[in-house]
Amino acid sequence: MAGVVGFQRWVRALTRARVAGMPALLSASRAASGPSKGMLPGPYPNTPEERAAAAKKYNMRVEDYEPHPDNGEGFGDYPKLPDRSQHERDPWYSWDHPDLRRNWGEPMHWNFDMFIRNRVDTSPTVVPWHTACKHLFGFIGFMLFMFYVGEQFPAYQAVGPKQYPYNNLYLERGGDPDKQPEEVKNYEI
Amino acid sequence: MGAHLARRYITETDTEPDPKKKFEFGPQVGLPDRNEREMVATQEQMNLAQLPVEQRDYCAHHLLKLMKCKRDNWPAFLSCKHERHDWDYCQNQDYLMRMKEYERERRLQLRKKRLAVQPEAA
């Protein structure tokens, strides 16, 4: 009941702004808790001054700052940081956020939420990647080859087939009782 | 133990018998006086005991005796050693017969090869 009243008051406040249609329902003022206009990402920087301003905005050195290529994907002036996950950062350094291994104000990677320590890990492998691949696929290939060889040359016991009575259990195996089965005689040896 | 595999795949690939294929020589070749194997348990008895198909072999009468002994003596599960030994011995003899059949087939194949070579040599 209180929620409905609050909603009605919100609608009345918006309509008092005398703007027609859909924009009346979208508030034009932002909450004060968010970033100020100067801190938000902007359009792609074309001149060196714009690049310097963008680097300063993101707390980066001008030499380090590299925006994403301007090919219509919509990154604007957001910096292109190397695709390294948080696993590769020094675990013993006293970060401001130890879990995220990040300091306050540091520029965040576009896919930062992917590179946290619970998710994608880009740290180098113990063994070089191509060596590890060679070992794994070599082993799997060898095992498949050996299984194939085992199919072609199976190991078996040097015994003849087991002998069953009553014409090789013709009736017990579902043979037609009216038909005459093939005669199977077994002898001792 | 395993010599047959070396024979089959390396040394005597043409004469060593293949257990998956039917044996070539009939039961009477070279053994004119062979006794037929006796089946003691009847089909009706095996049906009443509800034996699985794999166990309805030439040792089934021992197995039926063993099952009866176990049922009569339960819960004294150690009381049927004699019957169990009879069944096991019968199964062992059956396996030995299978081994002898294989060996017989192998020797007949070697003999066939020897005879095929002789008229050419002669």
Image: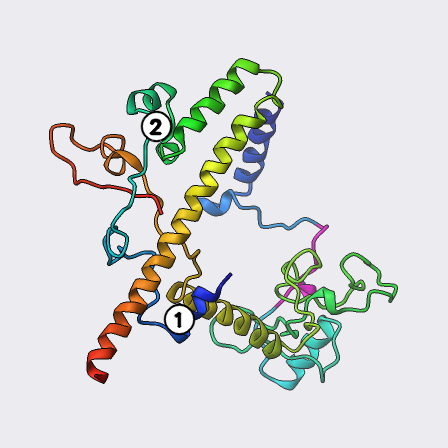
Q: Are marks 2 and 1 in contact (CB under 8 Å)?
A: no
Dot placed on the residue nearer the N-terminal end, 2 or 1: 1
Residue placed under numbered mark 2 in the picture: B40
Cα–Cα gap, marks 2 and 1: 40 Å
Q: Main secondary structure of the magenta part?
A: loop
Relative to the observer, which residue lies in front, A60 or A49? A60
Label of residue A107 in the image = none
Residue B116 in view: yes
Up the image or down, A9 lies above or below A73; here it is above
Kind of residue at disc 2: Val
Residue shown at 32% from the left, 59% from the top: B105
Residue range highlighted in magenta: A32-41
Residue shown at 72% from the left, 82% from the top: A62
Q: In the image, is A64 to the left or to the right of B45? A: right
Question: Residue B111 appears in which quarter of the rendering?
Answer: bottom left
Kind of residue at disc 1: Tyr
Most extreme residue toward the front is B33
User: Dot 2 lies on which element?
Assistant: loop
Label 2: how many residues lie within 10 Å, few (<14), some (14-19) or many (20+)? few
Relative to the observer, which residue lies in front, A122 or A19? A122
Residue placed under numbered mark 1 in the picture: B9
Quadrant where the C terminus of chain B sits is bottom left
Q: Dot 2 falls on which chain?
A: B
Residue A121 part of the magenta segment? no
Residue A39 part of the magenta segment? yes
Of the two numbered discs 2 and 1 in the rendering, the one whose residue sits closer to the viewer = 2
Relative to the observer, which residue lies in front, B44 or A52? B44
Residue A57 point in image, percent of width and height: 71, 71
